[in-house]
Amino acid sequence: MLIDKVTITIQGGNGGNGAVSFMRSEGNPKGGPDGGNGGNGGDVYFVGINDLTALDKFQYKKVWKAGDGVPGKKKNLFGKNAPDLVIRIPLGTRILAEDGNEITEITVAEKPYLIANGGKGGRGNNEFKSATNQTPRFAEKGEEGEKKLLTLELRLIAQIGLIGLPNAGKSTLLSVLTNAKPKIGDYPFTTLEPNVGMMEGIMLADIPGLIEGASEGKGLGTTFLKHIEKTQLLVHCIDVQTADPLKGYQTVRQEFEAYNPELLEKPEIIVLTKIDQVDAEEAKAKVAALTETKRTVYPSTILDENALATFQTKLVQAYKKYQTETRF
């Protein structure tokens, strides 16, 4: 099961304490202070990676803390700074504060994002000597690292999203267009989590099937509607054997409107799947039934390799056209 939302505690490392020490030797039994400073605690960084399963590690480990700085030592030896803690999370993850407000969203691969500061090391007693106090017998404690309770919420980043009612042929289409190997079956909700594949450098995601009332939590509910928000182009799959393809199309669109009306503005094409299951006249009638959508409709079957190759070319062209039109 895809883990796409977790709540965890993040903490920077504590600074090491400063040392209280005095120089002592046979020739200098009352030497001055020589306590060194403590090292700084490690910072905590998030780094985005192309791995949708990267939140899995948080399922059982809920507290992530960087290392503490090493305390200072005598002879003015400074403690070592602790290494930073780098936590890798999926691209497209939103970082929410304890109050629910968004801190940031991780959208750039391999770019470190500082999320919690480590504490500064404390100063040793050598730092506190002065003309009026030649033998300070105290040092500074290291600061505590910054501590935060955060919610990480993955919103799938894929350039193209395959959407539609359950059993509309999304997983099958994804498998033939990309190298993905999703679970495929002839029953609703075969796909229980998004599947992702690459097509000519473009990431495609098969979004689990929606049903009427999904925006209110029915079926798989809103669990995966959020993943559609990040796609740039939608491929709406409709089974040609559906009695009323226009109604099926409108059902999904109504759920979009109820969940987030902005989804209705995304570029979209329609794929009428499984046309090998009906005769030519019925396929033609189903295409005509979708004229009202004012969308481009592509009849499709996995049994026709030439037709699939043509569709793949058209899909890449549609995506590139979208990129050209939205580039500033």
Image: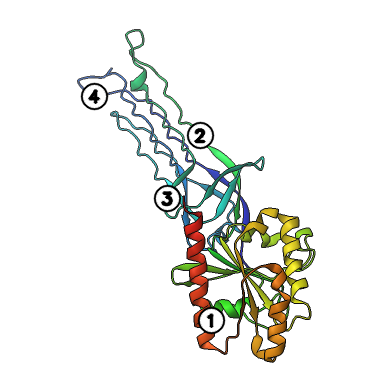
Residue at 32 percent across and 23 percent down: it is: 22
Crowd band around label 4 with a 10 angstrom C-alpha radius: few (<14), some (14–19), many (20+)? few
Residue at mark 1 to residue at mark 3: CA–CA distance: 33 Å
Q: Nearer the viewer, residue 34 or 92?
A: 92
Instruction: Using the image, tell me which numbered label, if any, was put on residue 144.
Output: 2
Residue at mark 1 to residue at mark 4: CA–CA distance: 80 Å
Q: Marks 4 and 3: in contact by CB < 8 Å?
A: no
Q: Nearer the viewer, residue 108 or 294?
A: 294
Q: Amino acid at mark 2?
A: Glu
Q: Nearer the viewer, residue 237 or 147?
A: 237
Nearer mark to the viewer, of 2 and 3: 3
Quadrant of the rendering where the N terminus is positioned: bottom right
Instruction: Using the image, tell me which numbered label, if any, was put on residue 242.
Output: none
Above or below: residue 207 compared with residue 133: below
The quarter of the picture where residue 74 lies is top left
Residue at 43 percent across and 38 percent down: it is: 41
Mark 1 highlights which residue? 176
